[in-house]
Image (cartoon, coloured by chain):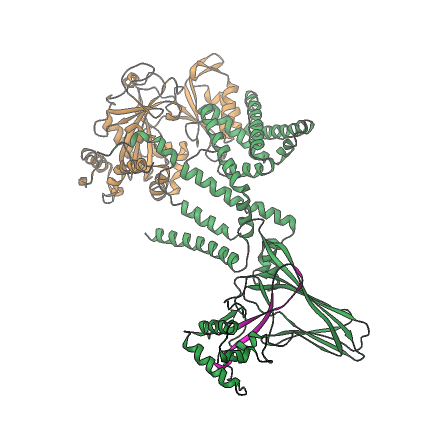
Chain colours: A orange, B green
Amino acid sequence: MIGFYRRLSANGVMGLNARNSRYIMPQNPRRFYRLVDNKVLCKERLLAHHVAAPVLLGEVSSQYDAGHLHKTLSGFTEFVIKPAAGSGGDGILVVTGRRDEYWLGGGGKLLSLGDIQYHVAGILAGMYSLGGQTDSAMIEALVHTDPLLREIAPEGVPDIRIIIYRGIPVMAMTRLPTRRSGGKANLHQGAIGAGINMLTGQTLSAVMNSSVVTVHPDTGTSVVGFQLPDWDNLLAIAARCYQAIPLGYMGVDLVIDKDHGPLVLEMNARPGLAIQIANSEGLAHRLAAIDRIEDPEQMTTEERLDCCQRLAEAGWSNQAS
Amino acid sequence: MFRFVHWLVLVALLIGAGIGVAVYKNQVLGYPLQPDMVEPTWIVQARIQITPDTGPVKVSLSLPVATPGMGQLRENFISRGYGLSTQHTNREREAVWAVRRASQPQSLYYQGVFYRDPVRTDFAPVPDFPPIPSLPEPYNTAMLAIVEDVRRQSADIESFTSELLARINSASPSEEMSLFVNSPDYRGQRVRIARTLLAGARIPTETVNGFPLSDVTRARPEQRLAVHTQQRWLFFDPASGQVGLPENFLVWWVGQRPPIDVEGATLVDLSWSIRRNELAALDLAEQRAVSQGAWHAPFSLLNLPVQAQSVYAVLLLVPIGAFIMALMRNVIGLPSFGTFMPVLIALAFRETGLLAGLLLFAFVVSIGLILRFYLAKLHLLLVPRLTAVLIIVVLLMVVLSLFSHRLGWEVGLSVGLFPMVILAMIIERMSIVWEERGPSDALMESAGSALIASLAFLAMTNPLVQHLSFVFPELMLVALGLTIMLGRYYGYRINELIRFRTLARKPA
């Protein structure tokens, strides 16, 4: 047990206690939390800094608005309803089309206006929000995943999580929904997590439910060694997110839309640790490499990307600075 | 670095203060560390029987003052019609009964309650050096010879006294010693001989009269020889020469003379009876504190009204449960609903017992969950739905109690003590987790909650934990210190060792 503990520590694996105490508490000022915890505010802030995000079609913040939902929704056939301050991907309703009176929900389920109103009311009452406070529901444009990604993610919306530490991208993974995860890009529910080579943007290794996999269980195609399109641009967008909301330790979730290109889906002030398993590498050594750089907060976005590249080339050892 | 030192000092202070006060209370004040501990106490009663003459009567009796290793809890005087006063000189205490006119034979009583008190070591103040007694010849020469001889064969006052007593008790005493032993003045009074001879060496001594405490109806006072070594008093058994007082020996009076003085009456009898009593160690400590007027006596929880006491007995257990909770969450990494919910469930388990509690908990939550899923179909808004779940929980509790009462299963009645609001919240929370993340997550979280609640329950119902937390509430400082210590545990949680097991390969 002790040896096991030591090996994890030597490999730089970060635990929840260490993440909270060493990185989140000192690096993430409380005042920025609401900017990421509330997705509407986050989106406004990102747009102000010219970072693309899925279009906000509308916001429902009162029971009265919910009563007039049919007016709000009348122009749209496909959209996503989310709690603005949701956590862990809970409370998301995906609508992909319309059949007369009904909307088409995830898995082809028919939804009446009442069903949608009920879901929105649940969101408004704070059913999915972090502390159970009342919340608002946001209606967002549906993301159409770039067909390039369909090779490794035949259904659902795969996303790319990039951890930004003091402005510099340190680790990334892509989350691929499976039939088991019900089309959700949620590792808890059985989505695949695949680590990404920070230099090339190729997937390195993949895990599903904490065990190593190499092929997608639904299709049998390899998920390892896949080249993500336009990787440098994805890194640049993630680094620009730091300009918008300077949280020292955060996760940026990106999706690639076939029409709009890379979009920032959301930002997370308490990103999970599963990314280490997906990359089969600990975070602590990489974070320490950045801590050895002087004042990374003062860099421009170009310098940050440069720095990320140099560190990645050097294998995140200290010669880089 | 500053923060680390600050933290370390705070933790050390809290834990040190908590343990320090507890140790003080245990060692000095005698608060027991174990529940249900009993301490012996002795009720010693002196009974004086007198037949008065015609005039006024005055009876004085020496009272126990200070015995090393013994303490006095309280005392009573029983003396109908007599005026009573007690006089305290620096090492003697006397009760004086007086009456102007008495006719019939009378009994006067004194009763004292004594307990063992290892902290008490005082006996009498440091005495002056006694003058060398001036004895008539040939005693004087004999004394000088014995002192000279014994001094040669001893190293210090203790060995001097031992040697001297050995000679007094010797079956074939030396010529000089026979003089004393066989003298009509000293015959049979070993202590007196020893004191005279020790005074010849200018060693301060005292005669000590007392009783070995045991159940006897007619106790005989025994004499001991006390010798002061300039640092402390040593006690010798004059017959065997053994050093030290026997265990549970109560000193009643000092000096050679009898302990009683009667004027205007004839002393018929003076007798002592001793009765051993068992007293709960906790009560004894309380009574001691009160009898000594200790500063902390008003601060004991045992002074509170009994109902308040039972409230605080439970209240003081909450930190224990909460600490276990913190340990489980931050070191083990068990998932649970809410932060302190398991502690509240554990409190409810106290009334139901563990197994019955878990069954009732599982029963109420699962029925509530089924009904909650049904309610979800009706599209109720959150707050009314929560209220509905709460009402259902209360209904379930009532129904369960009625049924179990009918079946003679009285444990079911205690379901009413479950925190129903908490149960309603668990049902709501569990149903969301169930829908959003699947049954396995929901069951994991509830199993984690139940496990933490069970562990907290086991700790909180441990008789030793209950006793310590109530009698030594300062141990809460230790719990606080440990919690603050835990707050800087930045290492892996046990469940993370499993979660990240694939990353534990040998470093390159």
Q: Is residue B388 left or right of residue A152?
A: right
Residue A118 in magenta stretch: no
Q: Residue B207, percent across and down?
A: 57, 74
Nearest the camera: B175 or B51? B175
Residue located 49% across and 56% down the image: B23
For the image, the number of numbered tags is 0
Q: Quadrant of the N terminus of chain A?
A: top left
Q: Quadrant of the C terminus of chain A?
A: top left
Residue B217 in magenta stretch: yes
Q: Residue B47, percent across and down?
A: 71, 67
Q: Residue B481, percent across and down?
A: 44, 50
Residue located 54% across and 42% down the image: B462
Q: Quadrant of residue A273?
A: top left
User: Is residue A230 something that shows in the picture?
Assistant: yes
User: Is residue A271 something that shows in the picture?
Assistant: no
Residue B454, compared with residue B164, is above or below; it is above
Nearest the camera: B26 or B227? B227
Nearest the camera: B368 or B376? B368
Nearest the camera: A123 or A224? A224
Residue B374, compared with residue B79, is above or below; it is above
Region rendered in magenta: B198-225
Q: Quadrant of residue B92?
A: bottom right
